[in-house]
Amino acid sequence: MSDAPDAKLKIVHYGHPALRQQAARIPRATEDLKRLVQRMVDLMRDSRGLGLAANQVGLPLRVAVVEWEGEPRVLVNPEIVSAKGEEVAEEGCLSVPRLYGNVTRPAEVVVRARDLSGRKLKLRAEGMLARALCHEVDHLNGRLFVDRVDESTLHWFIRTTQEGEVVTQPTTLEDALKVFTAASRREDE
Ligand SMILES: [Zn+2]
């Protein structure tokens, strides 16, 4: 990050090692970090994501951005300090494109983090927002939704028909992950 703070950010996909790394704690917010976060917000919005963790742009640092009531929220060193209940809903991930499946998450969480000025934040969230926070904190710990997915619900998004119907294709986890590892091997060549 420090050697090329303005290089173009790109979302890395399943198979990239950064997605499996435990991200490093950020000792203090630097100008580089602020620039990185701004570019992560732009990238998240361009990609129509609800959240983005630094691991997903190939940088294992403990920072994530999440859409929060129409505003991007920045979470530096976020930690889930309490979780309540259980909820099942469909999830996907910008780093595992076109693949979706049901994941059980807490219905309610409390997250502690810092913002870009170093102020302490305590966020209480439920539903989709709680899910997004858990998903992003997972990223910072090198975990992906496919590690937690209910495999019987796993499917590819194929297309949306003119009538607005969503066409999907069921898949096994093994077959789906093979598609990504084959693609990431091609990128290495
Ligand atoms: Zn994700």
Image: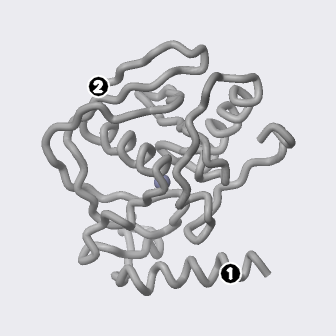
In the rendered image, is residue 72 in sight? no
Q: Tell me which residue sits at (36%, 66%) in the image.
A: 147
What element does badge 1 sit on?
helix
Displayed quadrant of residue 143: bottom left
Query: Within 10 Å of the Cα at label 2, are there few (<14), some (14-19), or many (20+) other Cα atoms?
Result: some
Q: Tell me the quarter of the image containing the C terminus.
A: bottom right
Q: Tell me which residue sits at (49%, 47%) in the image.
A: 140
The answer to whether residue 140 is above or below residue 156 is above
Q: Tell me which residue sits at (43%, 60%) in the image.
A: 144
Looking at the picture, tell me which residue is in the foreground, 160 or 37: 37
Question: Residues at badges 2 and 1 in contact (C-beta under 8 Å)?
Answer: no
* Amino acid bearing label 2: Arg
Displayed quadrant of residue 3: top right
Q: Tell me the quarter of the image containing the N terminus.
A: top right
The disc at residue 12 is none
The answer to whether residue 59 is above or below residue 81 is below
Residue 14 rendering spot, x and y as whole percentages: 55, 68
Residue 152 rendering spot, x and y as whole percentages: 24, 77
Q: Which comes before the other along the chain, label 2 or label 1?
A: 2
Q: Mark 2 points at which residue?
A: 124
Q: Tell me which residue sits at (50%, 32%) in the image.
A: 77
The disc at residue 185 is 1
Looking at the picture, tell me which residue is in the foreground, 38 or 5: 5
**Gap between marks 2 and 1, in whole Å?**
40 Å
Query: Within 10 Å of the Cα at label 1, are there few (<14), some (14-19), or many (20+) other Cα atoms?
Result: few
* Amino acid bearing label 1: Arg
Residue 161 rendering spot, x and y as whole percentages: 43, 71
